[in-house]
Amino acid sequence: MTGPAEGEECASEPSGDVAAVVGTPDAPAGLGGADVPELPPIGVGRDGRRLGWIEFVVGAVVYVAVQVGAGGVAYAAFGRLPGAPGLLAISAASAFAAVLVAAALRVRTPSALGLRRVPARTIALAVGLGIGVWLLSRVLIVVYISITGDHSDPQQSLTQFAGVAAAFWVVLLGGLVVPLGEELLFRGVGFGSMRRYGPVVATIVSSLVFAVAHGFNVVFLAVLVLAVLNAVLYERTRSIWPCFVTHASFNLCSFVILLLLV
């Protein structure tokens, strides 16, 4: 696969039906807000340096290395993997570490990761989208099980905790901190690195990587849908915040239901 050289602007933009769905690199920071000023292309710093394969690969390596390393240290120290709060803390740490290392390589600009403000109405819409995807995920889980017969869920351990303190940390980490780290990594770095090849390629690659990172299990289809939705949101808004809100709303729905059933 070839594309523009590192640091160059992407010359081609989406057109026709694709542009109508995912927008263009100069789209306003909102969903249809004509009163918002134009924003720079995705994944590009103020000096024109652009996220690319270096950031994509380094981010992935650091993400896996921190998870495996931290899990290994915990297992060696305690003879078992940590509980739900510990696993979520490791997941959050690995995502933020990957983002920091990848961004520090060349770009070093928060706006290249989508850290831009958006209108309040966009955030409100993101909350509704997150809840909607969570409701859809209940159907997708049934479809996945009926097709594959697979009931396994490696993330089931994240729902096994006891006590008020554990519940607090699980909701805080799993509902807010992890979603922010993952959106900065998979949309900010992942989508941003692949955006040079166009929004469709960036959406497919970043969404598949995000879904695979969560494992081939009962939530695979739901996670894939969430990833595609957030890729479109990022393309349309140029901001990571609507993606974070959608992701957080999705996760918090699961944790709230879980706490109500405990």
Image: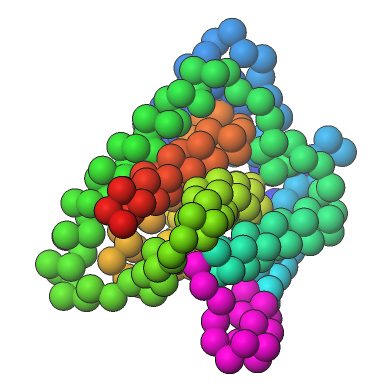
Q: Is residue 21 above or below residue 64?
A: above
* Residue at the limit of the structure toward the front, as seen here: 163
* Residue at the limit of the structure toward the top, as seen here: 35
Total marks drawn? Answer: 0
Q: Quadrant of residue 63?
A: bottom right
Q: Is the magenta stretch mostly helix, strand or loop?
A: helix
Query: What quarter of the picture does the N terminus occupy?
Result: bottom right
Q: In this view, does 32 lie above or below 63?
A: above
99 is within the stretch colored magenta: no
Query: What quarter of the picture does the C terminus occupy?
Result: bottom left
Q: In which quarter of the image is residue 100?
A: bottom right
Q: Can see residue 42? A: yes
The colouring scheme, among rainbow, by chain, secondary structure or one colour, is: rainbow
Please report the bounds of the magenta region as a residue range.
67-84
Q: Can see residue 68? A: no
Horizontal relation, residue 16 to residue 202: left or right: left
Horizontal relation, residue 176 to residue 46: left or right: left
Horizontal relation, residue 135 to residue 194: left or right: left
Q: Is residue 162 above or below residue 34?
A: below
Residue 14, position as x, y percentages in the image: 50, 35
76 is within the stretch colored magenta: yes
Q: In this view, does 72 lie above or below 83?
A: below
Horizontal relation, residue 47 to residue 37: left or right: right
The residue depicted at 23 percent of the width and 59 percent of the height is 141
The residue depicted at 83 percent of the width and 35 percent of the height is 46
The residue depicted at 68 percent of the width and 84 percent of the height is 73
Residue 147, position as x, y percentages in the image: 15, 69
Residue 222, position as x, y percentages in the image: 32, 54
